[in-house]
Image: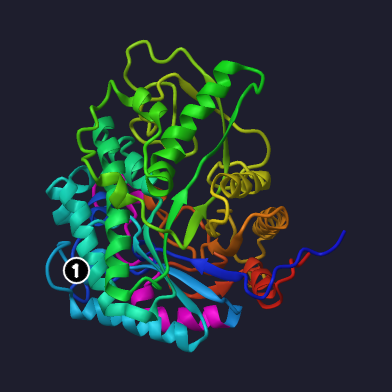
Amino acid sequence: MNQRTFPDSFVWGAATAAYQIEGAATEGGRGRSIWDDFSHTPGRTRGGDTGDVADDHYHRWQEDVALMAELGLGAYRLSISWPRVQPGGRGPLNPEGVTFYTRLLDALRAAGIAPVVTLYHWDLPSELEAAGGWTTRETAYAFAEYARAMARALGERVALWITVNEPWCSAFLGYAAGEHAPGRTEPAAALAAAHHLNLAHGLAAAAIRDELGESAQVSVSLNLHVTRPADPESAADLEAAHEVDLVGNHIFLGPMLDGSYPIGLRDLTRDITDAGYVRPGDLALIRQRLDVLGVNYYFTNSVRRSDGPADGSRGSGGSGGHGNGPASPWVGLDRVEFLPTAGPTTAMGWNIEPEGIYELLTALDNAYDGLPLMVTENGAAFDDAPGPDGEVHDPDRVDYLRRHIDAVGRARADGANVQGYFVWSLLDNFEWSYGYSKRFGIVRVDYDTQRRTLKDSARWYAQLARTGALPD
């Protein structure tokens, strides 16, 4: 079999998020975010872990940039901490916060690493949540103001702007399941949040281009669900899978790329909300040109039609791999049951299914012909630790990456316009409600000493990034 190769133009990167790695939660004029509030609430995170220190990247960013250069990365996807640069979410920028990011971006560019900047990776300023958070329209307008201010401050230092990361998680894990900050369990609020995140994306994309010109590159990162019917011959199971597709995918793909919400979504949720938050003109504001669609992929789901809950409370939807919050994130899907998936799993309990990323990329290419795609997150948590030699040997992660990147290459060979791949994550980090119990990094972080250690997967990925040829 021929070795899988990628063109020189293919982008190899790694990704992180501000709250997961920066630490310095009370330094440099940073305000509070919903994740500060959530993680400091007893019982919300495993072991009571918080992002107060995390990987101390705020103080160690120079060391981390040097690591990226050593790995030969072509790009680094980071997120801006909204409360670090604009405490409270409105008003003047915090000079100390802006300086931190300008220095980081300048160092990346000096090292030949293209900065890919995510404006929102879940750390909403606490003051905005107190005023209603993503359930209110004003938060979308505040986000657009913040996006414009960051475009003005960072300008051409940024190679690609990503407006929001995984808005599905923000809306449904944060406002329906209670699994993520702000920890609410209100189905109607989750649907309103989804719309206002869509609106925030559109307003921000327009603001960035208004500030920097039409040549500014703008994207969004969506965690799109690959869902299969338990029985492919069952019309009921096929319908259940379609419903997950509506609530899990097309609630964002529809407005952002087609300028409309699918009719079936309205039918599923009409008993929950009248969708009065969707105002005339919103869909035109949301549908902005995407220079590339960011795709985050980790696992697949299997579903079947169920009778639903006897009391109409939680439903049989479960979480579909999205933690164990007090309620289901799958708003409107009381008659959908998520089944355990077959095969090996990661430490997160997620099935390892490289075919899923192939299916997803080729399906997107078929649906949106010519739209450039980029894998903005893909990776796996495993229970790795240093061996007697002090090195971290993580063959399971190497195998996971090899198989998934090979599937990306196969999708490209079959015509999908995939332009890059970002491994999640560069560093072990604070894994949201799981605290520090799950390690996704290709670089190990000792949380007691903050020492960084390249894992075997980092060296493997470095070889790939330098050669464009998939190593054995």
Give 372 or 100, whichever is nearer the viewer.
372
Mark 1 residue crowding within 10 angstroms, few (<14) / some (14–19) / many (20+) = many
Rendering coords of residue 241 (x, y %): 53, 28
Give coordinates of residue 56: x percent, y percent. 37, 72
- Residue at x 27%, y 65% (from the top left corner): 207
In this rendering, position of residue 378 left or right of residue 128: right
**Mark 1 secondary-structure assignment:** loop
Q: Position of residue 74 (x, y in %)?
A: 56, 76
The residue that appears at 37% across and 70% down in the rendered structure is: 214
Q: Provide the residue designation for mark 1.
A: 86
Name which quarter of the figure residue 71 lies in.
bottom right
Quarter that holds the C terminus: bottom right
User: Magenta segment range?
Assistant: 40-69
Hey, which residue is sitting farthest bottom in the picture?
A: 110
Residue in the image at 57% along x and 56% along y: 370
Quarter of the figure that contains the N terminus: bottom right
Q: Is residue 468 above or below residue 138?
A: below
Asked if residue 396 is among those painted magenta in the image, a careful observer would answer no
- Total number of numbered discs in the rendering: 1
- Image side of residue 382 versus residue 58, left or right: right
Furthest residue in direction right, as rendered? 1
Q: Nearer the viewer, residue 194 or 215?
A: 215
Residue 107: which quarter of the image? bottom left
Q: State whether residue 46 appears in this view.
A: no
**Residue 228 seen anywhere in this rendered image of the structure:** yes
